[in-house]
Amino acid sequence: MNSFRDTIPTVDAQGRRVWMYPRKPPTGRRAAKNAPNFFALRSYLSWFLLAVLAFGPFIKINGHPLLMMNILERKFSIFGIMFWPQDFPIFALAMITGFIMIVLFTAVFGRIFCGWVCPQTVLLEMVFRKIEYAIEGDAAEQKALNDRPWDQEKITKKTIKHSLFFALSFVISNLLLGYIIGGDALIALITSPPTQHTGGFFALLLFTLMFYGLFARFREQACTFICPYGRFQSVLLDENSLVVAYDHKRGEERSRLLKGQTWEERLGIGKGDCVDCNLCVTVCPTGIDIRNGTQMECVNCCNCIDACNSVMERVKRPAGLIRHASMNNIDKGEKFSITPRIKAYSILLGVLMTALIALLVTRDSISMDLLRMRGSLYQTQPDGRISNTFEARVFNKTGTELRGNLRLIFPEGELVYGQDSALTLLPEQENKTLVVVLLHSDAITGRETSMDIGLEVNGRIVDHVKTTFMAPESAVQRRR
Ligand code: SF4
Ligand code: SF4
């Protein structure tokens, strides 16, 4: 009975790919008189999301990108709030909070994220698929085109389509890079010749090929085989979660609507509202039959809801044979209720969000890191003192320029840095300077001497770093 769960529609018995030709979902603002057209709603939302995707790297809040994940330079910006390497606990907590939010959202609303917000679905269904429909026509025409020999029309259509796909993939790769290095750096890169950054250019081409492969060929397979969120679905959903569901009580026993048959006659002989037109299957981008029940491949795109509602209108039955509903709603007629699981997730989410806000509010506005210079442990100076060289990285997370000083708090010695007596700490920047610490042998307690360096701003030590001062054995013996 559940044999459909043993196979997936996109792979045949020999393991070969079965290419999906989903039919265009019904257009218009309403799929039926009393039912919205979810495809239209998703299209409106996609315009907003695509605009965010396109302009995200260039939108700035407080002078910082809306979203930037600069892994290379360890700089992150979320909604214009900069996160530095020292803020990793906050960043990690923000990620965990985001994850719990998705878990809670999935427990209540099912996999709605996939169909409505996921960049893969938005780009595939709202950009690439629409281009495909515009050039090659609806499902039946696409299939006919693929089955026919390579004549002039086929070559022309395929060339235009794949050129557009490749160009769009190149644009997406650039935007992705913008989210990594920031919009300003991306513009600088685009406006300079590729010969000045051949490595980066080839990396871009590589990503372009990857996106092209994903949207031109791999498509729904990414959701079915690669995306971990799809796999999590089975543990996140329960019988109270809202999913795209077929009302089998109302629909079964499915059968074709016979000519001249009235609904009274049909229902009287035990037939249901499903007229077995198969439209819900033919519009599904993952090729599943939702009448079999909730399935891993379902990305909640709602195409089957729109399609079925349009059929229900034509056969004069109420909309909603396929709708957003929980299993308990369909099987037992229960209304949505807040289950203990949802309560537990909500409490956990509340705790995490409180902790996150507290950490954000109380995070240090100025902090310092000290890194020993690579390849240099110590140097012996002409006057006999031993020196160690470090790089100080001072993070000024405030919006104003500050003046700071570095102080050798412990042990006694000399600390030299920069060319000026004070450090200029540019606002919301990482400020770097070379620091040399010089100690006489009587301040050296061993091969490694404990050391404390403080950062002073406005006459107050705002941060300090405890590290060690390295010295040669000869300096240690001199002290003895
Ligand atoms: S679209 Fe509706 S009526 Fe047609 S097969 Fe699917 S569930 Fe049945
Ligand atoms: S079953 Fe319906 S909601 Fe799920 S992927 Fe297919 S068309 Fe979309």
Image (cartoon, grey):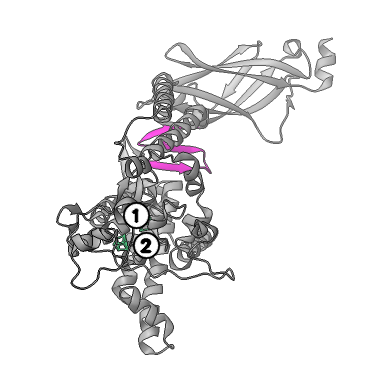
- Residue 301: numbered disc: 1
Quadrant assignment for the C terminus: top right
Most distant residue in the front direction: 269
Q: Which residues are magenta?
A: 67-84
Q: How many marks?
A: 2
Check mark 1 vs ligand 2: CB closer than 8 Å? yes or no.
yes
Residue at (73% x, 27% y) in the render? 379
Q: Is residue 14 visible?
A: yes
Residues at circles 2 and 1 in contact by the CB criterion of under 8 Å: yes
- Residue 284: numbered disc: 2
Position of residue 249 measured from the top left corner of the image (x, y, whole percent): 32, 51
Foreground: 232 or 355?
Answer: 232
In terms of secondary structure, what is the magenta stretch mainly?
strand
Residue at (29% x, 52% y) in the render? 250
Foreground: 178 or 33?
Answer: 33
Position of residue 138 measured from the top left corner of the image (x, y, whole percent): 31, 73
Residue type at mark 2: give it.
Cys
